Amino acid sequence: VVQSRGWLFYDENENRRRRVATSDAVACKYVRRELRKLTDGDRDRYLQAVAEVHRTPRLIKSLLKTHLGQDTLKHCSIFHGGNTFLTAHAAFQYDFERLLQQVDPSIASTYWDTSVDDLSYGSDWRTSTPVLKWFSLDEDDGTYTYFSGLEIPTDRSVPEHNAYGRMTQAYNNDNARYVWRTDSVCGFPSKLRLPGCAALEGALRQSTLSDFRAKLETDFHSVLHPALGGAFDCEPMRGGEVVLKEQSTTALATSLSQKAPQLL
């Protein structure tokens, strides 16, 4: 709500103009739209703002520090594996939107309805959806992308960082300077489909908040992270850890989520 004082309005009555001064509150509303529903101009402004937030340490570090927490020190994530998953991730989205509006006050955050891609493309979504092109890191074809050369924040003063000071979990000992992704999971080509209507229906059928949260975290959150970012340098291990050759890709994604929820 924006307080506006001294706005002037004119009342037309019998060919007379009467000047009226008023003081009132004006509601400013933002609408979050699906990525494909944006105009080309609106989408360009949104992606430019997202890239700028990630390239500005004072903006992205605050959000990243909160999300990382003290996972290694406390051996748990307070934002995953419980009902706080729902409110915490809604709060993360709100905070991210506020960061975007520091760059461009005219925009709102958006969302990606993966059920559209699942229905239209099935398992071929990687080569068909326009969303991956918009968020591409790849400049191999000479085409500019918003996120190419995106550096990973480094800060040894935060509680959670790896041996190289990268702001990630301590166990993720990757010294890569720039953000990168893989379309495989632990060396196996990913066959994961994006969460679709069946996953959404499964969540909405739940009768308790805890079960609803569990379905969302497993069927959406834990699938989307490895599907979009992949996983690499995994070691086949026994004794309760991930055993690659004995699990489907979906089961592997769930195991990775349980083992390292902040990675996903």
Image (spheres, rainbow, N blue to C red):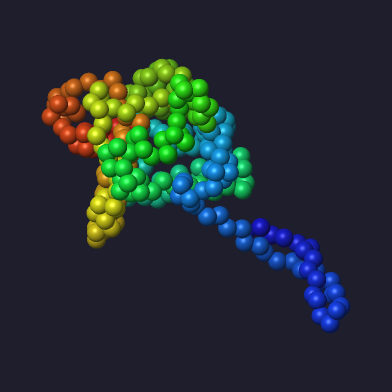
The residue lying toward the viewer, choosing from 31 and 101, is 31
Measured as percent of width and height from the top left, residue 109 is found at 51, 47
Q: Is residue 123 above or below residue 238?
A: below
On-image quarter of the N terminus: bottom right
- Residue at 42 percent across and 39 percent down: it is 130
Measured as percent of width and height from the top left, residue 214 is found at 26, 48
Could you tell me if residue 16 is visible in this image? yes
On-image quarter of the C terminus: top left
Q: Is residue 64 above or below residue 208?
A: above
Q: Is residue 204 left or right of residue 101?
A: left
- Residue at 56 percent across and 54 percent down: it is 30
Q: Is residue 81 above or below residue 191?
A: below
- Residue at 21 percent across and 34 percent down: it is 249
Measured as percent of width and height from the top left, residue 83 is found at 32, 50
Q: Is residue 116 left or right of residue 28?
A: left
- Residue at 34 percent across and 35 percent down: it is 126
Please tell me in which quadrant of the rendered image residue 8 appears: bottom right
